[in-house]
Amino acid sequence: MPQSTSTLTLFRNQTFRMLWIAALASNFGGLVQAVGAAWMMTSLTQSQSMVALVQSSVTLPIMVFSLLAGVFADNFDRRRVMLIAQSFMLMVSIVLAVLAYEGLLSPWLLLMFTFLIGCGTALHNPSWQASMGDIVSRDELSAAVSLNSVGFNLMRSIGPAAGGAIVAIAGAAAAFAVNAFSYFGIIAALWFWRPATPQRRLPREPMGSAFLAGLRYVAMSPNLLKVIFRGFLFGLSAIAILALLPLIVRELLQGGAFVYGVLLGCFGAGAVCGALLNARLRARFHNESITRGAFLAFAVSSITLAFSRHYVLSGAALLLAGGSWVMALSLFNVTIQLSTPRWVVGRALALYQTGVFGGMAGGSWAWGAVAENFGADRAMIAAAVLLVLGAIAGLSVPLPDFANLNFDPLNTFREPPLRLDLKQRSGPIMIMIDYEIAQEDLLEFLAAMSARRRIRLRDGAQQWALLRDLENPDIWTETYHVPTWVEYVRHHERRTQADSESYERLLKLHRGKERPKVHRMIERQAISIRDDTPLKTEPPPNPD
């Protein structure tokens, strides 16, 4: 289906349309608030590092708390998580507006409040992005991510200019008040949304286990690691423009708050154009080609901003930067979602955000320090050099193309009838699977088992091993452990349609008359652990 048709179909989806419109208002308020905070900092202090830290204070909590938020997104009602996050940001914004109106804000207090708003954003984002897969089909997911980018950047094209005007006319307190009001729309939309909640057959995964499961899944997924690494490089280098733009306007262009807002609007307008071009570019080019182009285009924008002393040229550079920004980040986001099953998608997105926003937080601080010591223009040149290196990194760590694999649950596992009365927490459980493999198939079997090992460990197995029978060398036994019986069931429920290919490959190599024999065993200590040591023997008597 063409991208344009998919887009129209998405707007016929009442839930998507309602949340998309509500997000427009929320994004508008957030951008107005960002302009107010950045420009207020320039009036509170002359320190260039403190100005750049405004951007860090928003991105740092997203880096620190995203994985925890991803655990919430995968294990709790995502709608409720988003309602809590939005309500928290509403309260923080109200207090921030009141303090600004009373003239009680200091530089560090302003950073604290922007940090708290960033915490709310960190909690909200994984649930919001993972919910797209609940609202639209897999085929529509790329269009949904692009439309969300279009919505955000439509507001980016007018929100900063409006924020600059608000700050210039009524002060930063008014900008903070506008942001507070913007939360009511999305809170109402989330309140009236009633998503279908799947029934949980298994108990909710403990927080610690869920946290480790997310880390383990991403660590065992090479494609996800590539996306996260490239996202980190992009965030680290590209954030220089947004972090230093207030200084560029004030020092290089000799402008004020309104000029700052207009130039941010140029960045947003470029991002809208980039989002609209996404589908055509993805149809014609590989993901890595688009990613390298985004890095290099951002480098050109950084160099232009370093040398430009005219509003029009700087605005054109920001149009190019905005388009590159949204093409790269939306591409990273969609690649993560299409390469991850639903049970862990929130945590995968959270780890991706940790990488990207970690790069942004570190980059905001680093570019601010460079600007403090060498000037904003030289900081932009240094950022351009790093962007070029990020493009070159694609030669060794290329971004994967969209996976055509089916990550829907396999749903073929049925709990076997057990003669022992096990509880869900009973364990440890040891699994042994016997295969009969001919000598001529040995190399292919070992290659298949290598893939099988990665899947097992990725989905929660421990102490995986492959054993060969010394008396009958054609018999091979795959073994692994899981802590409890419920973790064994959960391990199988994580299996996806894409994983079935690995097992089918092993079945074709198996030469036994019946399917491979599965032994499910529970470990038991025969004696006390304190006594589980070799017995000491008396030394032989001294012959002397």
Image: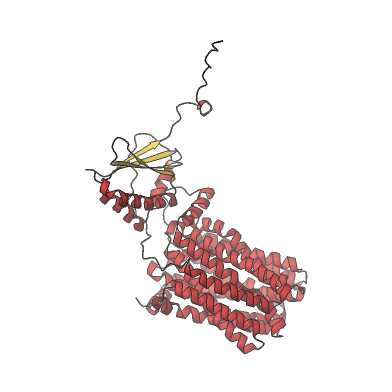
Residue 29 appearing in the image: no
Furthest residue to the left? 513
The C terminus lies in which quarter of the figure? Answer: top right
Res 170 visible: yes
Horizontal side, residue 323 vs residue 103: left or right: left
Q: With respect to residue 386, does 516 lie above or below? A: above
**Residue 102 point in image, percent of width and height:** 77, 71
In what quadrant of the picture does the N terminus appear?
Answer: bottom left
Q: How many marks?
A: 0
Which residue corresponds to the image point at 63% horizontal and 73% vertical from the top-left?
179
The answer to which of 233 and 56 lies nearer the viewer is: 233
Q: Is residue 211 above or below residue 421?
A: below
Residue 467: where, in percent of width, then height? 36, 41
Name the residue at 32% across, 42% down. Answer: 476
Where residue 478 sits, quadrant-wise, is: top left
How is colour applied across the structure in the image? secondary structure
Front-lying residue, 372 or 70: 372
Residue occupying the far front of the picture: 544
Instruction: State the residue lying farthest toward the top.
Output: 544
Q: Quadrant location of residue 220?
A: bottom left
Image coords of residue 137 (percent x, y): 39, 67
99 vs 288, left or right, is right
**Residue 109 placement (x, y as % from top left):** 73, 66
- Residue situated in front as seen by the camera: 28 or 351: 351
Q: Is residue 380 left or right of residue 333?
A: right
